[in-house]
Amino acid sequence: EAVFLKQEAKAKGIHHVHAHFSTNSAAVALLSRRLGGPSYSFTAHGPDEFDDPAANGLPLKVAHSLFVAAITDYARDVILTATSERDADKVHVVRCGIDLDEFDLTPPPENARIVCVGRLCSAKAQALLVEAVPPLVTNYPDLELVFIGDGEDRAKIEKRVADLGLENHVSLAGWGTGEDVRAAIQSARIVALPSFAEGLPIVLMESLAMGRAVVTTQINGIPELVDSECGWI
């Protein structure tokens, strides 16, 4: 792949390439550069790419790059720690964003609906929300928890919902289009993301853009996005 990239770049007059994620794509860009190919830069998103920075070759990839974009202060700190702060002047925080014109800012409805958007998997920890429902139902008998998404944990979550007798309070809507997701968030009072593995969650940005408070976890870049003025960590 690195040889092919070098050849294509030369044939098309490409002098610089930018890779997203510091893993395979950045490795190809690095190898191509070492073979005489174009200069490169990359964006580090996390979280998986930060699990083992040394095994990922992060110091080498940073050393040979022109610059590195980190999507959060947290990501930049991880990179600087992995590189012993060498080439710190190369590493810049470039945050992700959304087009606010695509989202309508509206007052939250007077309901007890919580929406959770994301792939159903252990890293996203949706099962924790199911466990949180029974004590809440006592004070909020109309409480609804709606999951938008699908994945390997669907059967596990469905079983737990049945075991706890929460069929009238928890529903799994499956995958939805961008329009479906926006409509679901608009219909909710709160958006919850109990995840254990995130970079800087776009769904939280979308929720805040629509005026919905969020409940989420204190991991990676999330505390840079959510504070007591717009939600709960």
Image (cartoon, rainbow, N blue to C red):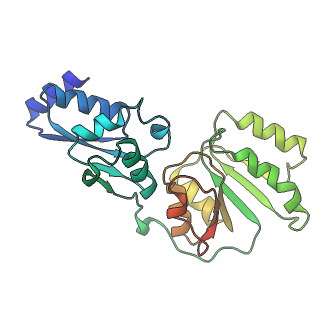
Q: Residue 4: image x %, image y %?
A: 20, 23
Position of residue 175 relative to residue 140, above or below, is above
Residue, x 53% and y 74% (percent of image)?
A: 105
Q: Nearest the camera: 185 or 44?
A: 44
Q: Is residue 142 visible?
A: yes
Q: Is residue 115 left or right of residue 199?
A: right
Q: Nearer the viewer, residue 163 or 82?
A: 82
What's the residue at 34%, 46% (across, down)?
43
- Residue 51 against residue 214 in the figure, above or below: above
**Image point (56%, 66%), residue name:** 226
Q: Is residue 31 left or right of residue 21?
A: left
Residue at 20% from the left image edge and 28% from the top image edge = 32
Q: State the image quarter where residue 182 is shown.
A: bottom right
Residue 30 lies left or right of residue 201; in this view the side is left
Q: Point out the image quarter for the C terminus.
A: bottom right
Say if 184 sits above or below 22 in the image: below
Residue 169 appears in the picture as rendered: no
Closer to the camera in the image, 63 or 70: 63
Report x, y in % for residue 110: 73, 75
Give how far across and how far down residue 143 sits, in percent: 81, 62
